[in-house]
Structure formats: C-alpha cells, structure tokens
Image (cartoon, helix red, strand yellow):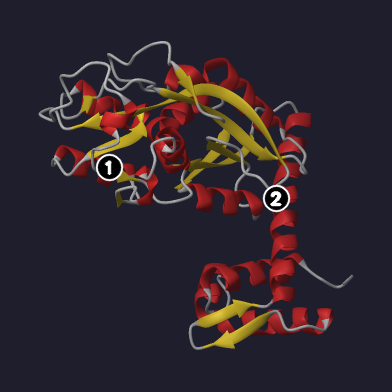
Amino acid sequence: MRNLTLRQLRTLVAIQTSSRINAAAKALHLTPPAVTLQLKQLEDELGAALFDRTAEGMRPTSAGLAVIEAAQAIEERLRMLSDEIDAIKGARKGSLIVGAVSTAKYFALRIFAGFMKAFPDVDMKLFVGNRAETILRLKNHQIDVALMGSPPRGLPVSAVEFGDHPLVIVGAPDHPLARRRDISRAEVAREHFIVREPGSGTRMSFERFLGEIAGRLDDPGTEMDSNETIKQAVMAGLGVAFISAHAVASEVEGARLALLDVAGLPVLRHWFMVARSDRAVTPVMAAFQDFLTGKGAGFLPLPAGLRSPPVDRAAP
C-alpha cells in the first residue's frame, strides 16, 4: 500500500458519492478515462475489486467501503493539520463542519452567526438531516461535530451539554383542549397524534411519555418526517402533536398553534455537541465547544407561556 496516493483516494470517494464515473470525473475536473485509470491503479495496488459495476451505478464492495472510510479519515486529519498549523501561527482560522438534526435548524443558524461574529475567519459549513443521517455523517468523518439530543450508541463519541430541550404538545388554537388546564395523560392519549418517524429523538420521547397508557402505542398516529409538515397538519386540525418547543415557538407566539396544558409537560431533554472521541480536537472545535457551553442556551427559542421549570425529565 506504499504506492497509494491522495488523488487515488479522492477519486474513490468521488465515485462513491456520485455512483457514476462521468459524474465523478466532472466533480474532480478530470476526464472519465483518467478517473477509470486512477481506480484501476488503486485496485491493482490493493489486489481487490473496490466497486461492483451495476445498472444502477458503481456500488462499493466491502473492500471499497473499508478504503473509503480510511480515505475520509485521512482527509479529516489533513484538514485538522491545517487548523493546527494555523493555531501554531497564532491565527484564529480553520474550518468547522457541523451536522445538526432537523429540530436543531430552529437555532443552528443563530449559533453560527454568533460564533462567526467572534471568529470571522473560520470557514463554517452546516448539514441538516434527521437523526440517522446525522449519525451516519459523524460515523463517516463527514462532519466534525453534531448538534443533537441523546448521543448515539455504538460509536465512540464525547458529548457536551449546552442547553435544555423542552418537548410539548400543541393543537390548533380552536382545539377543544386548548382552553383546558391540567389535562391528564390518559385524556390527551385519546387524541389523534401527528408523529415523527420511528427512531427520531422526538418519537422516542413521545413513546416514553405515553408508554404507560395501555395499548396507546399500538397505533401511535399519523407519521410525518418533518416538523414543518407536522405543524401544518396540526394547524389544519388533523390532530395534535408531541413536538419540540423550539420548533413551535414562532407559531405559538403568532397564535397559529396552542400549547396544551398537559400534566407532566414539558418533558425536558437536552442538547449536546457530539464529536468522535477517537479523533484529535482541533482549536476551532475547542473554541466552538466553549462558545456553546457559555452562550449556546441563549440562542434556543422558547414560546411564551411555557411552564417553567419543566416538571418531568426524560432520559437524555
């Protein structure tokens, strides 16, 4: 493997990303024959096929996936080296790639703006996706840190808490329960819920909250894969929703949604900055962590009228 080159490894990642030789060539500003040659030389050097050629495109083999993971780790380490050199030279420069679960989009850009004001020369990138997508990006070294709720299991990570994450139940302003007080769990459990997809942090908390009601989770409700769609469904009168207070702050303030006063709510979870623990911490990552722990909570939007302090806690 002594003859492997960065160009070959980058070619491999480009093919995996695009699934096509022509698309990879375009992304790399090379000709398709040049990309094919790089791949052949790499396969010859390793003595293994790295892709299966299928009608749907290039699919990495097990050997290909192993090399791609190593290539991504090498790219990450080179970027870290650049940050370390900048730090040694005394420059407040570097780069930071942040992944955020979809609910974090309601404050992530505010945090970005605050951090970039303090560190204007840092190159920042943000990827927003669901929990599974964010964990996959962290696993594949595609992001430096993730903003999320409960840290993932099965992956070596470190997690630093930077703020509270209340979860509430909302309905349309004219919902019969909107003017009620101290609604019991048993009563609200009879409502039709609009719920997030299985595996999302909000869905897991919803299932914990109503799990003690016998049979309630046999038919959780209507599944939708985004907070925005859920809010529109609730405003249209299709049901109620167990949702992040951050996601509905604007709608509650504008009287387009109503907080339901349910006993045991809000459920309090937490926000974490999560990074892989098997990699070095760059100066920019350390600065971002300090910024979050010191000022992050101030960027979290909350609707007026939210019961404080929260009266129930879910496991992080």
Instruction: Give the numbered dot on residue 4.
Output: none
- Which residue occupies the foreground of this view, 194 or 69? 194
In which quadrant of the rendered image does the N terminus lie?
A: bottom right
Local secondary structure at mark 2: helix
Name the residue that disc number 2 marks: 76
In which quadrant of the rendered image does the C terminus lie?
A: top right
- Residue at x 37% of width, y 46% of height: 196
Name the residue that disc number 1 marks: 193
Q: Is residue 8 above or below residue 273?
A: below
Q: Is residue 78 above or below residue 168?
A: below
- Which residue occupies the foreground of this view, 27 or 189? 189
Residue 141 is at least partly visible in this image: no
Q: Position of residue 60 (x, y in %)?
A: 64, 76
- The label nearer to you, 1 versus 2, is 1
The residue sitting at the left extreme is 174
Amino acid identity at mark 1: Phe
Q: CA separation, marks 1 and 2? A: 42 Å
